[in-house]
Amino acid sequence: MTSTSKKIALCELASVRSGLVLSRKKSKGEDGEMYALLTLRAVKEDGVLDMSELDMYISIGVLSNTYLTNIGDVIVRLTWPYSAVIIDEQSAGLLVSSHFVIIRPNNDRLDSDYLHWMLNRQSTRRRIYENTSANMLNAVRPQFFSELKISLPPMVEQRKIAKLQTLHQREQFLMKLLMKERSQLAQLLTENIYNTTK
């Protein structure tokens, strides 16, 4: 980070709001508007969104777009491990519950991918944990994120950091996939050898 970076409160760079309290709008039956619901299970500790872990939610009516994800939003869990995910084309339009905070950059001073990286840093997560309320869930108040001061380097540097982080995440994904495929291959070969010796 260069010496020209300054710390600015997130509320000056983005809109910050909590998600919907689901019990207020939940349909009692099968009638109503259906939404794909972002779940705590879907937000992985490493900042990746697992779309296979979404739930369905039926509301009593059409919900405000403020509770639905937009491309470039950063969604953060309000409970441990305080993981942040970034919304892309595939994850736009998801319903966000009050278990999360929605951070929507509103100007050209803050890159969404940089914010995603910044919020997933261990030092940031430590700051979040230190500001949790004293309850069993160690939940942080959504207001904390409005007041959170982050380093804001020039946009060019933000994009370099974001690009490097995106490449790192892609590499990690491919390494996990390779390990899984090698494990399956080893099991298949072992079973094949065993079956031919019978």
Image: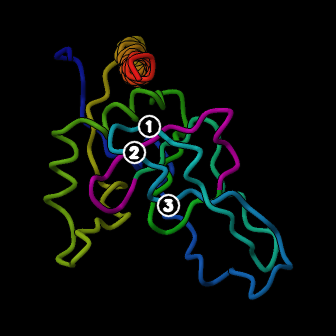
Q: CA distance from mark 3 to mark 1?
A: 21 Å
| Labels 3 and 1 touching (C-beta < 8 A) | no
Q: Is residue 93 found left or right of 136 in the rendered image? A: right
Residue annotated with mark 1:
48
Front residue of this view, candidates 70 and 188? 188
Q: Is residue 194 found left or right of 123 in the rendered image? A: right
Residue type, mark 2 in image? Lys
Residue annotated with mark 2:
44
Name the spot of residue 92 as percent of width and height, x first. 67, 42
Asked if residue 57 is positioned above or below residue 90 in the image, the reply reads below
Front residue of this view, candidates 145 and 83? 83
| Labels 2 and 1 touching (C-beta < 8 A) | yes
Residue annotated with mark 3:
17
Which of disc 1 and disc 3 is earlier in sequence? 3
State the extent of the magenta-drawn residues as a range.
77-94
Name the spot of residue 53 as percent of width and height, x first. 55, 52
Front residue of this view, candidates 104 and 163? 163
**Circle nearer the viewer, 3 or 1:** 1
